[in-house]
Image (cartoon, rainbow, N blue to C red):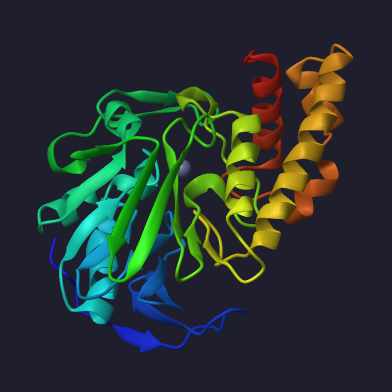
Amino acid sequence: MMIRTLIQTTILSTSLLVPSMALAQDDVQVQTTDLGHGLYMLATDQAGNVGILVGEDGVFMIDTQYERLAPLIDHAQREISGQDVELVLNTHWHGDHVQGNAYFAERGAVIAAHHTVRERLTHPQTSHLLGSTAEPLAGAFLPSLNLGDHFTITMNGQTADIVHTPTAHTDGDLFIVFEEANVIHAGDLLFSGMFPYIDLDTGGTVEGYIAGMEAIIARSDENTKIISGHGPLSTRADLEASVAMLREGKARVQALVDQGLTLAQIQEANPLADFHEDWNWRFITTERMTTTLYRDITGRLE
Ligand SMILES: [Zn+2]
């Protein structure tokens, strides 16, 4: 697929933290946000947010979105760096974070991820919550650098501290702390202002997810710029709000489980009703969040 012509460049919006610029193409836009120290967030409304670190040592990219969007993402990073991507890190195995891998690998990038990601990607993965199965990937889509639980990359004057959080959103989540820049890429440990997807079928748990968010909070201060997996550029306060919502939501569902209610009865009682307006979204609805909490607590599907 050729890199298509850039249709327009516009100033779209100004975030709370820093000015942003958007590249528009057909109906998909890449919004580029300069975080300082050679770090940028590249966002579309289609898939997981991308982070890049640009400098003399080359381009380090975190997550690659979908295959069809990879040329657009590459175009956006080239506008900044003028070069190919050197190193890709996947925060976890989900398709909206890894399907652009082959595009960048074929242009010379090394693909890195937690070692469980390669194992997940080479076998079918079924989600009971979504009612769908992700088919295996092969060849250039797969990570070739399979990381352990703690890893440091020094590049472009920045130290990237890469931390595995077991049993969180999946079993292979990494978050990345850029210490000098005070920037963190949270991967899907942060769905900012939205109910999170906790993938119980591939090793995620609610307590592990909360522990993962708390691990990021522990590495943050009030000035830390946090690239969410989904949603806007965020702050520690967004993580704290998400932790509080999940803890309260889990306690409410737990109380109904303790009374002996079935999943259907709990859905009917709708214990998350007052979270609906602020946290419900098209992918993780209030009903799906309730189902996730029930299944996590009981270990049962119904
Ligand atoms: Zn995900």
Residue 126, compared with residue 47, is above or below; it is above
Please determine whether, in this image, residue 205 is positioned above or below residue 230: above
Up/down of 235 relative to 281, above or below: below
* Nearer the observer, 98 or 55: 55
Residue found at the very far right of the displayed protein: 259
User: Seen in the image, is 205 located left or right of residue 147?
Assistant: right
The residue sitting at 20% across, 75% down in the picture is 56
Image spot of residue 149 (x, y percent): 40, 36
Q: Is residue 126 left or right of residue 3?
A: right
Q: Residue at x 35, y 79 (%)?
A: 23
Is residue 62 visible from the viewing direction of this image?
A: yes
**Depicted 100 relative to depicted 80: above or below:** above
Q: Residue at x 34, y 51 (%)?
A: 152
What count of labels does the image hold?
0
Query: Which x, y percent locates residue 40?
Result: 39, 72
Horizontal side of 265 relative to 299 (left or right) equals right
- Residue 268 position in % (x across, y down): 82, 27
Viewer-closest of 27 and 140: 140
Q: Quadrant of residue 283?
A: top right
Residue under the point 19% across and 69% down? 57
